[in-house]
Image (cartoon, rainbow, N blue to C red):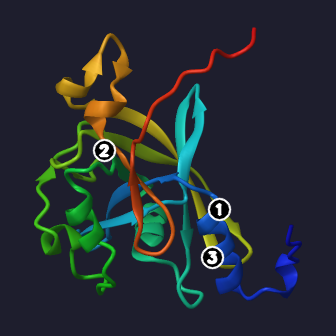
Amino acid sequence: MLSIDPSVNTERENYKLLIGSIIPRPIAFVTSLSNAGVLNGAPFSYFNIVSANPPMVSISIQRSGGKQKDTARNILDTKEFVIHIVDEQNVAQINETAASLAPDQSEIELANLSPVPSTVISVPGVKEAKVRMECILEQAIELGGNTDLIIGRIVRFHIEEAIYEQGKIDPITLAAVSRLAGNDYAKVGDIFTIKRPK
C-alpha cells in the first residue's frame, strides 16, 4: 500500500487524492443574491448534513487565487441562500452554471433555469430541482486562508410531491446524482439493506 505525506504534495495532488477517493459526493446547487441583486448559482460537491436538530447543512467553498467566490461573498453579505439537490433531470443545466462568470452575470440565466420565489428568505430558488432548502447562515469559518466553510440552518423545505411519501423521500424517483472525479458523475446504483445493530 502506498503511504503519502500530504505536506509534500502540491494542492492539486492532494485535491486529486481527495476527489478520487471520497466518492460518491452529493452535489448542492446553491443560489445566492449579490448586493446588486444578481441571482448567482453554482454547484458544490463539498456538501453534507451537519445536524437534524436544528436542521443544518454545510458547503465548503474553495477560494480562487485567494479571492472568495461569488457564492461565499453573497452568503456572507446577505446571510441567506438556497440549496438544491442535483438530479438526473437537471444535472446538464446545473453543470453549465460551473462556468466562470463575472459577478454581474447570472448563471441562472446562462443555464436557462427558472427562478421561483422562496417562502422565508429573499433568495429565489430554481423550479428545476425536486428538493430545495431555504437556508440562513448559521456560521462561516475561514479554513487555512483558502476555504470558506458555510453552515446553513434550513428554515424551509420544498419537496416535489411525487418523490415524497409518509415523511420519506424515495431515492429512486429523486434520482439524485453524485460527483466523482474529473468530469464524472454517478447515479444511484443498486440499493442494498443491512440491519444496524441495536
Q: Which residue is mark 2?
A: 121
SS label for mark 1: helix
Q: Position of residue 127 (x, y in %)?
A: 15, 47
Could you tell me the amino acid type at mark 1? Ser
In terms of sequence position, does the residue under pointer 2 or pointer 1 come before the other? 1
Could you tell me the amino acid type at mark 3? Lys
Q: Which residue is mark 3?
A: 16
> In terms of image quadrants, where is residue 104?
bottom left
Q: Position of residue 132 (x, y in %)?
A: 30, 42
Residue 7 vertical position relative to residue 87 in the rendered view, above or below = below
Residue 17 vertical position relative to residue 162 in the rendered view, above or below = below
Query: What is the distance, in whole Å, between disc 2 and disc 3 at their CAs?
Result: 36 Å
**Residue 74, disc:** none
Residue 167 vertical position relative to residue 138 in the rendered view, above or below = above
Q: Which residue is mark 1?
A: 21
> In terms of image quadrants, where is residue 190?
top left
Could you tell me the amino acid type at mark 2? Ile
**Image point (63%, 58%), residue name:** 22
**Image point (26%, 59%), residue name:** 91
In terms of sequence position, does the residue under pointer 2 or pointer 3 come before the other? 3
Of the two numbered discs 2 and 1 in the rendering, the one whose residue sits closer to the viewer = 1
In terms of sequence position, does the residue under pointer 1 or pointer 3 come before the other? 3
Tell which of 178 and 195 is nearer to you. 195
Screen quadrant of the C terminus: top right
Give the crowd class for mark 1: few <14, some 14-19, many >=20 residues within 10 Å. Answer: few
SS label for mark 2: loop
